[in-house]
Image (cartoon, rainbow, N blue to C red):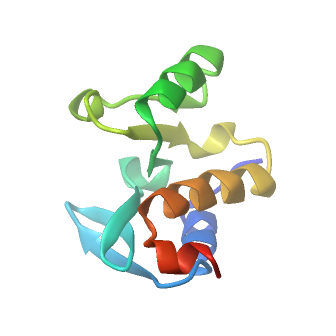
Amino acid sequence: MTATGDDVRAVALSLPETKELFEWQMPTFRVKGKLFLTLPEHESSMAVRCPIADRDELVQAEPEKFWIAGHEANNAWIRVHLSALEDLDELEAIIADSWRQAAPRELLGE
């Protein structure tokens, strides 16, 4: 599967209270004002929230898919090569997980 920025956008915007903004020369996605996804590198990758302990494991297990940008080394974010994703289900799972980490509690029950 080769996911596109449009695929990412469609999945992200399907989640409750999500808005797309253009910041830092790229599309960004927020839930109730809290950032959970960006589309850097000309929309060939996405940056998502990921606990630091989990992201290190992901990068070691699948370095062709996941990496950590230098400026995000101390933050709970991971980059994902869209072309390396297996299918739409994997794309949806990654985006939904990032959204859940940013969403306020009242939205998590929906």
Image check: 65 left or right of 44?
right
Instruction: Give coordinates of residue 85: x percent, y percent.
Output: 70, 42
Image check: 33 left or right of 83?
left
Looking at the image, the residue that sits furthest to the top is 60
Which residue is at a point 36% across and 39% down the rendered structure image?
Answer: 76
| Label total for image | 0
Image check: 53 left or right of 35?
right
In the rendered view, would you say 46 is above or below 55? below
Which residue is at a point 63% across and 70% down the rendered structure image?
Answer: 11
In the rendered view, would you say 107 is above or below 3? below
Image quadrant assignment for residue 104: bottom left
In the rendered view, would you say 77 is above or below 73? below
Instruction: Give coordinates of residue 32: x percent, y percent.
Output: 37, 80
Which residue is at a point 48% across and 21% down the rendered structure image?
Answer: 56
Which residue is at a point 37% across and 51% down the rendered structure image?
Answer: 40
Nearest to the observer: residue 39 or residue 42: 39
In the rendered view, would you say 35 is above or below 98? below
Nearest to the observer: residue 74 or residue 82: 74
Nearest to the observer: residue 5 or residue 56: 56
Instruction: Give coordinates of residue 105: x percent, y percent.
Output: 48, 72
Image check: 109 left or right of 33?
right
